[in-house]
Amino acid sequence: MATLSEQDAARAVLRWYAEMGVDEAVAPSPADYYSWTRAEPGAAPRIEAVRAQAAADAAAEYAAHEPSALSTDEAIKAAEAAAAACDTFEALDAAVKAFEGCPLKAGAKNTVFTDGVPGADLLVIGEAPGRDEDRLGKPFVGRAGQLLDRMLAAIGRSRDDNVLISNVIFWRPPANRTPTALETAVCRPFVDRLIEITEPKAVLIAGGAPLQALLGITGIMRARGVWREVETMGGKRYPALPTYHPAFLLRQPAGKRLAWADLQSLDARLKDH
Ligand code: URA
């Protein structure tokens, strides 16, 4: 039986990864393969050596960004104290960026806090940064974000003029998985303070994850379109409207009809007195 050369085997593995949807390396930072010195000059590195070097690099990288040494309770308390100390949007922005209590930060390129107009009367809260957001340090800048922009434009809203956008967590989860309850709990004091400082007329809750994190409700299908109140840790209440996440609408365009009804309800509330 013919055996594959190491290069052919490596190509086959890469092709298989691509077919499986793997589109990026998972180490916290990119590996500079050209700086590796183990291979003989001119020789292709052996696959075992490549793997061993990648594992060593990843371990060194994780050690350099040692995940938060705080327990979850300690991290939540630290977030509460840091958020409570902020009286302005600028102070809160700096406090989130300086916060080291969320382990997701170790694997993220950027902190993704807000985009748009601080103090806007509409605050949109989504789930979590994805790859594009992590790369650019701004929420909702990928395909879902472009759809969100078009939805908001349909009711005369834009992040340049009259919307502030954020998420329930500020660092990209590995492989874009849904944030865990502990991760959202650690970020929640900052989200609450953001709501209190913004004092929006309405909070648009985009999707099931922020619905669960902010209102403790599961089931976006039934919850969407129904006005509720989000209560912050400071005991203040703000009108909140759950709707579908734009990434869901990209996959299920039939949901746009109901999302449009939600946007009209939002528009009416924002124009009310
Ligand atoms: N999806 C979200 O929920 N938030 C983002 O910032 C991007 C995509």
Image (spheres, helix red, strand yellow):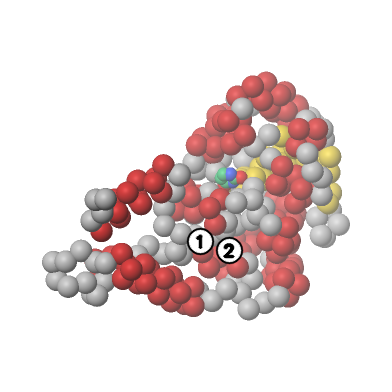
Label 1 neighbourhood size at 10 Å, few (<14), some (14-19), many (20+)? Answer: many
SS at badge 2: helix
Are the residues tagged 1 and 2 within 8 Å (C-beta)?
A: yes
Q: Which residue is mark 2?
A: 104
Residue 33's x, y, as percent? 28, 65
**Residue 108 disc label:** 1
Answer with the quarter of the image where residue 172 lies: bottom right
Of residues 46 and 264, which is closer to you in this image? Answer: 46
SS at badge 1: loop
Going by the numbered disc 2, the residue's amino acid type is: Leu
Of residues 66 and 123, which is closer to you in this image? Answer: 66
Q: Residue at x 73, y 28 (%)?
A: 262
Going by the numbered disc 1, the residue's amino acid type is: Ala
Q: Residue at x 66, y 42 (%)?
A: 124
Residue 75's x, y, as percent? 70, 72
Residue 126's x, y, as percent? 65, 45
